[in-house]
Image (cartoon, grey):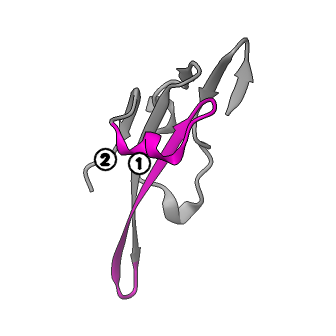
Amino acid sequence: MTESDGCLRVLPARNAPEWARNGLDPAWRPAPVAMRPRQTLRWQINHRRTTERGWYYRLDTLNVSYGNRTAEVFLHPPTHRVDELSRL
């Protein structure tokens, strides 16, 4: 996350650990999301890892609110939504 000129730019880290990679080419990831005050963002990405006991599925959800808000802001639909869910 970087903030400049009253705008917050959000892009989750690209360098995921080996076990968390979901097979997507990082070049195809969405662009950073620019947020203004009082806006919210929900970014979802999933991962699958195989182990000796089978496979492990993980869904990561990043909820971001820019500005002074209460936790109740996340009870409503987000202003911005990014879906990086891959077919596993």
Q: Is residue 49 left or right of residue 38?
A: left
Q: Amino acid at mark 1?
A: Ile
Nearer to us in this view, 36 or 50:
36
Q: What is the C-alpha distance between the residues marked 2 and 1?
A: 8 Å
Label 1 neighbour load within 10 Å: few <14, some 14-19, many 20+: some
Q: Is 54 included in the stretch rendered in magenta? A: yes
Residue at the right extreme, as displayed:
4
Q: Is 62 included in the stretch rendered in magenta? A: yes
The percent position of residue 49, horizontal first and vertical second, equals 41, 69
Examine the rendered structure and indicate whether residue 57 appears above or below residue 39.
below
Residue that carries the numbered disc 1 in the rendered image: 45
Quadrant assignment, res 70 = top right
Which residue lies at the image location 54% right of the left edge and 39% below the top edge? 64
Which residue lies at the image location 44% right of the left edge and 30% below the top edge? 28
Element under disc 2: loop
Tell me which segment is drawn in magenta: 51-76
Which residue lies at the image location 25% right of the left edge and 50% below the top edge? 87
Residue at the bottom extreme, as displayed:
53
Q: Amino acid at mark 2?
A: Ser
The percent position of residue 85, horizontal first and vertical second, equals 33, 46
Quadrant assignment, res 81 = top left
Examine the rendered structure and indicate whether residue 81 appears above or below residue 8.
below
Quadrant assignment, res 10 = top right
Residue that carries the numbered disc 2 in the rendered image: 86
Q: Which image quarter holds the C terminus?
A: bottom left
Examine the rendered structure and indicate whether residue 66 appears above or below residue 21.
above
Q: Which image quarter holds the N terminus?
A: top right
Nearer to us in this view, 69 or 6:
69
